[in-house]
Image (spheres, rainbow, N blue to C red):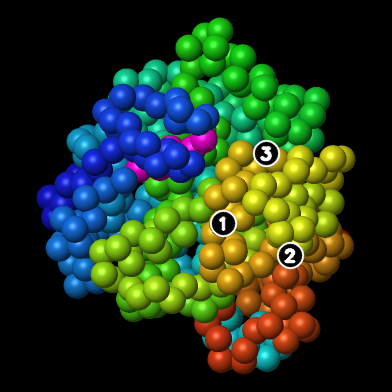
Amino acid sequence: MPQNRPASTLIHLQCSRTGKTYEADQLRTVAPDSGRPLLARYDLEAAAKTLTLESLAFRPRGMWRYSEVMPIQDPAHEVSLGEGSTPMLLCPRLGGELGLSGLWVKEEGRNPTGTFKARGLSAAVSRALELGARELAVPTAGNAGAALAAYAARAGLTAHVAMPKDAPKAVMDEVRAYGASLKLIDGLIGDAGHWIAEGCRDHGWFNIATLKEPYRVEGKKTMGYELWEDFGGELPDLILYPTGGGTGLIGMWKAFDELEAMGKIGSDRPRMVAVQASGCAPIVKAVEEGSDEAEVWQGAQTLAPGIRVPHAFADDLILQAVRDSGGTALAVEDEHIVSAMHRWSATEGIDPSPEGAATLCALEILKERGEVGRDERVVLFNCGTGLKHPELRPQ
Ligand SMILES: Cc1ncc(COP(=O)(O)O)c(C=O)c1O
């Protein structure tokens, strides 16, 4: 652990629904009072003194550079494979085609295990290790399982992963290669969730399901800190994010709240656009209906597995972030996703996952509707590498 990083200012955990606080020095899942997600709270006044753009310039790369607002108490427990500090790539050719002067992609495919899931699982596994968990488990659409398997191996812990039996083969191979046990489920991520919950009950595994423990979102929030750093202490105008469980969207929104509380930014925020597939769009439906919660989507189907999530556990937090930001949620068609993958690769040399490509489709919709200004700064999240999807290559 490099010496020039300040200590964590973690104070306690707080229920996202009731505001009740809980000590953070023991393993916790959801808030005991409400069953809703717990969020980590920090001494932001103290953190603000050292977390500056100037000091960051001298810190090592990677998501652990924001150490004041990360939960690990002893740096020896940091389980890292070099996650974070991913490239923010200007896309002038694609931007030109869309009539935009500032189109960027946050290239999350560059993370360990090839997706932004590495951030969340690095944080969650580190904190689980610190608090004494030994067997970790996750239900997943695929990529979170690969990331858990890798970080558990790195930490010397045992991992149990359950995913739909039609998840990408490359991802199943990854999970096995990292030495985790893999259960294939005849169903979707929610069914995998039931199987994992049973394992946790029967065998004492620690459940790292999306927002059912407090720290995955702490890893994902570092994307928000990186945007702030990438834009020289400002934020972009528009962010398009492929939304399944919504950890990254909720995490970035939390990062923006923390940055504002520290006096690093004002109250202006990017419009957050949650992007889903038309075959599984519970958040889009809830936004359209003006609802605070999303109904479970029946018959979920899309070739973008990471966003095939019929019910996001933290639906209320996703909807709140989208609304408070003045953003929206959009559903895109699978066939457009595939052509967007090919177009993006061939135009910019960037190899998007189908979930990442969905954000380009959504941007085209917003552009057609006249909802994006020519000089707005727009960030698309390419959440993973296209290499896991050989079946979607141009033939
Ligand atoms: C490649 C990819 N993109 C997007 C998502 C959705 O991420 P989130 O859970 O933060 O909404 C996932 C989740 O599995 C994923 O694997």
User: Residue beneath label 2, please?
Assistant: 330
Callout in the foreground (2, 1) = 1
Q: Residue furthest top?
A: 202
Which-is-in-front pick, marks 3 and 2?
2
- Of the residues under marks 3 and 2, which one precedes in the sequence? 3
**In what element is the residue under mark 3?**
loop
Q: Is 170 placed above or below 99 here? A: above
Q: Main secondary structure of the magenta part?
A: strand
Q: According to the image, label 3 marks what residue?
A: 141
* Residue 129 falls in image quadrant: top left
Instruction: Where is residue 227? Give x, y as percent.
Output: 42, 69
Quarter of the N terminus within the rendering: top left
Q: Nearer the viewer, residue 17 or 111?
A: 17
What distance separates the C-alpha of mark 3 from that of mark 1? 24 Å
Question: Residue 58: which quarter of the image?
Answer: bottom left
- The magenta region covers 36-40
Can you give x and y, in whole percent of width and height, for residue 48 in the image?
Answer: 20, 62
Q: What residue type is labelled 3?
A: Ala
Q: How far apart are marks 3 and 2 (CA)?
A: 20 Å
Residue 114 seen: no
